Image (cartoon, rainbow, N blue to C red):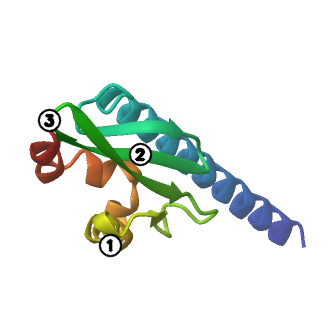
Amino acid sequence: MLKMLLMNADNSMSSYLSDMACLNRLKSDIRILCEIFPPTHSLFRVTSATVDEITCSFVVKKGSSEKKYSINANITENYPSDPPVWFSDSDDISGSVQVLATTEGNDNYVSSFFCSTPFLLIVY
């Protein structure tokens, strides 16, 4: 009986440590995204970010005017096993949202896509 209790306690502690590691990774990823894409970035901006939700803007400039397209991500309880749920109110960027919404494995981490070479080449 004592052995079972110790095994359950060990499993609970391992699960807790794993959850904390994922939370710490998410916080780190959010800090990185906010540093790379501040609210003043010319093409892509992280406008707000918490461990529950990230709000970003694509900025399209035409002459002296600019149009912003908002993209949001809800971070689920099972992150990173389940990817963030990405959505936008604009149909103009539905293709971009679709790419974000179809990640798996390590690509579920919020920094994986945004810090990837193809994305950085687009926005820089």
Q: Residue at x 23, y 38 (%)?
A: 43
Q: Which mark is residue 56?
A: 2
Q: Earlier in the sequence, mark 2 or mark 3?
A: 2
Q: Earlier in the sequence, mark 2 or mark 1?
A: 2
> How far, Cα to Cα, is label 2 from label 3?
22 Å
Give the amino acid type for the residue marked by disc 1 in the picture: Gln
Q: Secondary structure at mark 1?
A: helix
Q: Which residue is mark 1?
A: 98
> How far, Cα to Cα, is label 2 from label 1?
15 Å
x and y, in percent, of residue 63 in the image: 14, 35
Badge 1: residue crowd in 10 Å (few <14, some 14–19, many ≥20): few
Give the amino acid type for the residue marked by disc 2 in the picture: Cys
Farthest residue, direction right: 1
Q: Secondary structure at mark 3?
A: loop
x and y, in percent, of residue 34 in the image: 40, 32
Query: Looking at this view, is 69 or 38 the one in front?
Result: 69
- Residue 2 lies, with reference to residue 32, above or below; the image says below
- Residue 7 lies, with reference to residue 35, above or below; the image says below
Badge 2: residue crowd in 10 Å (few <14, some 14–19, many ≥20): many
Q: Which residue is mark 3?
A: 63
Query: Looking at this view, is 89 or 44 the one in front?
Result: 89
Q: In terms of image quadrants, where is residue 88?
A: bottom left
> How far, Cα to Cα, is label 3 from label 1?
29 Å
Query: Looking at this view, is 44 or 62 the one in front?
Result: 62
Give the amino acid type for the residue marked by disc 3 in the picture: Gly
Q: Secondary structure at mark 2?
A: strand
Q: Residue at x 46, y 65 (%)?
A: 87
Mark in front: 2 vs 3: 3
